[in-house]
Image: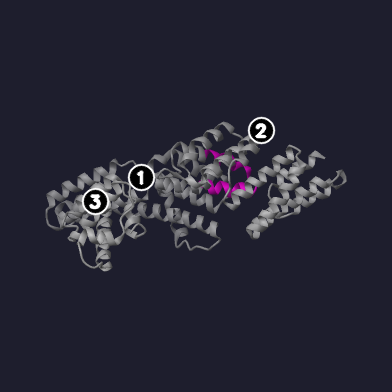
Amino acid sequence: MNKSKLARFLDTFSKEDWRALAQFTENPFFNQRSEAISLLHILQKSRSQGKPYPDKEKVFQQIFGVGPYDDQRVRMAMSALLQTAEKYLAVRDFIQDKPAYQFRLCRTLRQRNLHTAASETWLDGANDLKNRPWRNAEYHYEWYKFQEEKYRAIHQLPEVETMAIQPLSDQLDVAFLSRKLWQCCFLLAHQARYNTACNFGFLDSILPYAEKYLHLPAVSIYYRCYLALTQPGENQHFQLFKNELFENDTLFPPEELQDLYILAINFCTRRYNEGDLRFLHDQFDLYKRGFDKNYFLSEGVLSRFTYLNAATIGLNVQDFEWVEKFITEYTQHLDIQHRESLFAFNMARLEYQKSNLGDALFLLQRAEYKETMLALAAKTLQLKIYYELEEFDLLESHLQATAAFIRRKKIMGYHRDNYINLMHIVHKIMQMDRSDRQTLRQTIHETKPLAEKEWLLSRLGDF
């Protein structure tokens, strides 16, 4: 029972959901299976007591009484309860979306020729939609549907002659353009990430028409984003995208804002990786504002990759005060299995940047790094600390242990070569004399892939 689809589904319910589901399940309009009600009471009692759900044999006894166990009857009760719980979530979501509810009710009233009631409901729904803060593509499409419903309500009445029809067509254009531009931006992101070709349809034909609606953020932000992604060498497109995003971020729901910020951050990352350092501070601005506004949290949880990347950018721009505050405050939002290792690693990086090498080494050694790539990153930082502390015997042992770690983990391809090359060149630096410096500098430049290339080159200045 505890591993069933029903159990996993109900485990996502809050206390309020459990209470509301009990009322919902007892309503014969939504559920006509008495065994579903009984099963819910059994599961709800276990949940309230903090106990595991009972097994199916015990459930059968409590619902159906004595007699031989019938697995099919229990399964049917579980299926009935699952379907009812799914209905509850769908109905709750629909009713809470007041404009959507009122639009559907308005249409139903019109179809029953209750025109006065339909008109009042339409006005309530339209006002609720207008009072929402968001003005994204979904808003423009919902507003188009309301305008279309208004037209349908009066198209056979004399009032239709005085209704302006052109705005209805224009509203559909806005809804379509904003959604099409949104889709194309994410197609471009997918294309860049997975190196796969995407078909953008007739976007090129309609793109000039979007300029008519650049006063609307739902169009302009994705228009600027699309131009930035397709013309990365034209810096003004990204700056307009970033500026409009900051100016209008209250007009988009949190989930969409997270997507927009990630689009902008990934653009900066690609440009930085291509050697354009101008976008480093733009990327940092996006992280700072995004965290100030809580755009990167999904139900209170922060991706460990976002946590690592944000700390990395903060360290790169050397805003150590922000980095320390960020690491400390946001560790609690990480998945519990990653908290200790990520906190220790990021704090070690911070102390290393501040030249507190002993503190950095202590932090690295206090955590266990179960994830292979994080373990390699930690071992690389430890390597640098041993070198800079001139602990060359420890460094030699560390190089051998790291090489063994790489062989044992069977790390393949790019990552394996990256770190093997690093170990090899560090070992050469330890053994070289001044006459070897220029040759080794050329080797570092030519070796690909190679982690910590800039740090390796800086070490040559020690000789």
- The front one of 101 and 443 is 443
Cα gap from disc 2 to disc 3, whole angstroms: 56 Å
Q: Which quadrant does the N terminus fall into?
A: bottom left
Q: Amino acid at mark 3?
A: Leu
Q: Amino acid at mark 1?
A: Arg
Q: Which mark is residue 356?
A: 2
Observer able to see residue 451: yes
Cα gap from disc 3 to disc 1, whole angstroms: 33 Å
Observer able to see residue 282: no
Whether label 2 touches label 3, CB < 8 Å: no
Whichever of labels 2 and 3 marks the residue nearer the N terminus, that label is: 3
Q: Which mark is residue 445?
A: none
Q: Please report the residue visible at 52 percent of the width from the left and 33 percent of the height from the top.
A: 325
Q: Quadrant of residue 360?
A: top right
Q: Which residue is mark 1?
A: 135
Query: Residue 425 appears at what percent x and percent y?
Result: 76, 50
Q: Residue 281 in magenta?
A: yes
Query: Residue 305 appears at what percent x and percent y?
Result: 53, 47
Whether label 3 touches label 1, CB < 8 Å: no
- The front one of 262 and 211 is 262
Q: Amino acid at mark 2?
A: Asn
For marks 2 and 1, give the one nearer the viewer. Answer: 2
> Callout 3: few (<14), some (14-19), or many (20+) C-alpha neighbours within 10 Å?
many
> Callout 2: few (<14), some (14-19), or many (20+) C-alpha neighbours within 10 Å?
some
Query: Residue 50 appears at what percent x and percent y?
Result: 33, 47
Q: Residue furthest right?
A: 435
The magenta segment is: 264-285
Tell me the element at label 3.
helix
Q: How would you classify the magenta stretch by its main secondary structure?
A: helix
Q: Please report the residue visible at 53 percent of the width from the left and 63 percent of the height from the top.
A: 197
Q: Which quadrant does the C terminus fall into?
A: top right
Q: Which residue is mark 3?
A: 21
